[in-house]
Image (cartoon, rainbow, N blue to C red):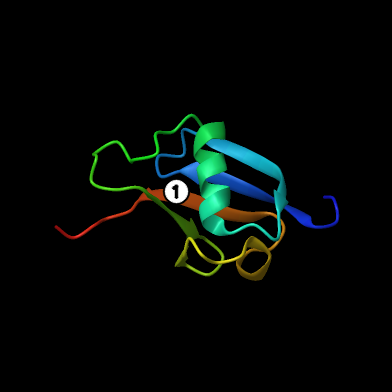
Amino acid sequence: MKNGTISLCVQDMSGQRQVVARDVRRDASWGETLDSLLTTMDLPKNEPAGTGGWAGHLEREGRHIHPSEIVGDALVDNDTVVLQPEVTAG
């Protein structure tokens, strides 16, 4: 871990796609980080059912991470985040 960065374990809901994201910037928003992770994990910007995007579920706290949250404020080194479809009411 470099100063100013953390490492995260990120996986999709199925557990089939999992990466250890190293050097995640602490000063980045979760939304910026999520966009980068989707590319790294080769996941589409919109979740497969086409109902919306993706949300990060922070396992340690059992809650979703808001896109505007700053990584260094919401997450700690080696946290596990599960990417889940973001449900939008229609």
Of 15 and 22, which appears nearest the observer?
Answer: 22
Q: Left or right: 49 with respect to 19? A: left
Q: Residue at x 55, y 51 (%)?
A: 32
Q: Which residue is mark 1?
A: 83
- Residue type of the residue flagged with mark 1: Leu
Residue 63, image quadrant: bottom left
Residue 26, image quadrant: bottom right
Q: Residue at x 46, y 33 (%)?
A: 16
Q: Residue at x 65, y 50 (%)?
A: 8
Looking at the rendered structure, the secondary structure element under dot 1 is strand
Q: Position of residue 72 (x, y in %)?
A: 68, 65
Q: Position of residue 60 (x, y in %)?
A: 56, 65
Q: Left or right: 45 with respect to 8? A: left
Q: Position of residue 17 (x, y in %)?
A: 49, 34
Of 80 and 90, which appears nearest the observer?
Answer: 90
Q: Residue at x 49, y 38 (%)?
A: 38
